[in-house]
Image (spheres, rainbow, N blue to C red):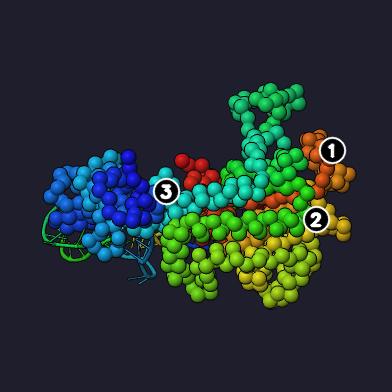
Amino acid sequence: MRTKIKDLLASEGTQNGITIKGWVRTKRGSKNVSFIAMNDGSTINNIQVVADNANFDEEVLKRITTGAALRVVGNLIESQGAGQNYEVEAKEILVMGDASTDEYPLQPKRHSLEFLREIAHLRPRTNYFSAVLRIRNAAAYAIHEYFNQKGFVWMHTPIITGSDAEGAGEMFKVTNFDINNAPKTEDGEVDFSQDFFGKATNLTVSGQLEAELGAMALGEVYTFGPTFRAENSNTTRHLAEFWMVEPEVAFNDLDDNMDLAEDFLKYVIKSILEKCGDDLTFLSKRLADEEKVKPAAERSPMELKEKLQFVAENDFERVSYTDAIQILRNSKPNKKKKFQYLINEWGADLQSEHERYLVEKHFKKPVILFDYPANIKAFYMRENEDGKTVRAMDILFPGIGEMVGGSQREERYDVLLNKIKTMGIDEEELSWYLDTRKFGTAPHSGFGLGFERLILFLTGMGNIRDVIPFPRTPGNANF
RNA sequence: UCCCCCAUAGCUCAGUUGGUUAGAGCACCUGACUGUUAAUCAGGGUGUCCCUGGUUCGAGUCCAGGUGAGGGAGCCA
């Protein structure tokens, strides 16, 4: 039996005969005594193991190096040094796995995130990354907890899809063909009727359309799973493989949808503040250190925990696209021609510089933009009475941009069919989707949340490749 | 995909107008030290200066191409 370091550090008193297993972070010491900082991933904090050198084989002590796996049997005693309440007085030390000092790349010092990305198989062993992974786990748990409490059904939508009309971006092809020798039809095209599924298939870019089917039966559903986009996106906020949360609720209109999204985000943030205190404290401190190096203008006005608290406790700003255009048109950067894309008239798609202005300069809090022009949004969004806008909403977060994208869905069969036709989408492909509007249609709404973008916000990390264990990006599928 | 930067020791980085034997801190190794907190002190340099080609008497330094990485934009979550 081993005791987790988290539990030992929280111990109410001394304990005899405990066993810990974990990895060495640092070893230091003098002629008579060695101090080993050990971590087992249960907490960001290390426990100090103290070994009286006289009681141990010199060869064993030599093998205790940064990265080595140890089993230590001993007593939890009150620390005789400053800096920690308890420490483990070692009686027995077994080196379970050595870590060669001249090969092990992690050192007891700060490494750059770029370097750690190159050794993604070892980076969970760092404070930085283990904190992110624990927060990621707690956030996933909080998401399920939230929806469960609200009576949502977690629906497993397919990863492999036969539909190419999801309309959310480039898709990865799935085939069993020998790509150099695929069967061809008479006119020279690849003959997918002979492929595994009997048709061309792809990895999903969204579970929304299927989630809508579920919502029209179960009332409230959500998806939470991997999602794939074959876009050649090279940014700090895009991945080719990422996790997405997509709630879909029957009878909800756009206002209900915005209420749900805001309440949901605040719940997850509060949950992390409550459960990941140690990890947040570490990240908060680390980020504050990095801020010090930056010029004053680029520094964030709040530190991580404050920022999370602020967002959890204040209402998001809700602004229609039309009002947002007004604000932007009259803004200083627009008048002084500081925007790369100047806002002149209604109908323009907002660039990230505009979104950033609204969120970071004008409102200084998360902003929900709604009622966008129909021609810049997807076919399934419900048309407003004005005939030119749709019931879409995006939630923009400071430093991240679009966290959530959602809409009230077009539930009117004729309107939807017409939209599909004018956008040149194959209606045969979507006949099953159209059936929901044919049989017992009802207003419904939903949204998609980029899980990793949420983790970016929760951890204060700057690059999405640092909040997923093994990032998949164009040109990179290592590990 | 476009734009901008960058690539020197295991890591982080310095390297002057092109100049002879390429440096620092940390890591690592050796030793010292009565309890340390990324321990401290003394000693030790471990290198395909990303690759290919060019300019030059001479290239880590200049030029061209390539590769890799980072930031920004677009696409979006």
Determine whether the residue tagged by mark 1 lies in a helix, strand or loop: loop
* Residue to which mark 2 is pinned: A390
Q: In the drawing, what numbered circle is on residue A93?
A: none
B65 up-or-down from A172: above or below: below
Question: Mark 2 near mark 1, Cβ–Cβ under 8 Å?
Answer: no
Residue A209 lies left or right of residue A397; in this view the side is right
Q: Give me the residue at 86% from left, 43% from top.
A: A413
Residue ID at (17%, 52%)? A52
Q: Which chain letter goes with mark 2? A: A
Seen in the picture, residue A92 relative to B25 is either above or below; the reply is: above
Q: Which is more N-terminal, label 1 or label 3?
A: 3
Residue A200 drawn at (x, y percent): 69, 31
Closer to us: mark 2 or mark 1? 1
| Mark 3 to mark 1 CA distance (whole Å) | 50 Å
The residue singled out by tag 1 in the image is A439
Q: Secondary structure at mark 2?
A: strand
Can you give x and y, in whole percent of width and height, for residue A169 in the image? 68, 46
Query: What amino acid is labelled 3 in the image?
Result: Pro
Amino acid type, residue under disc 2 in the picture: Val
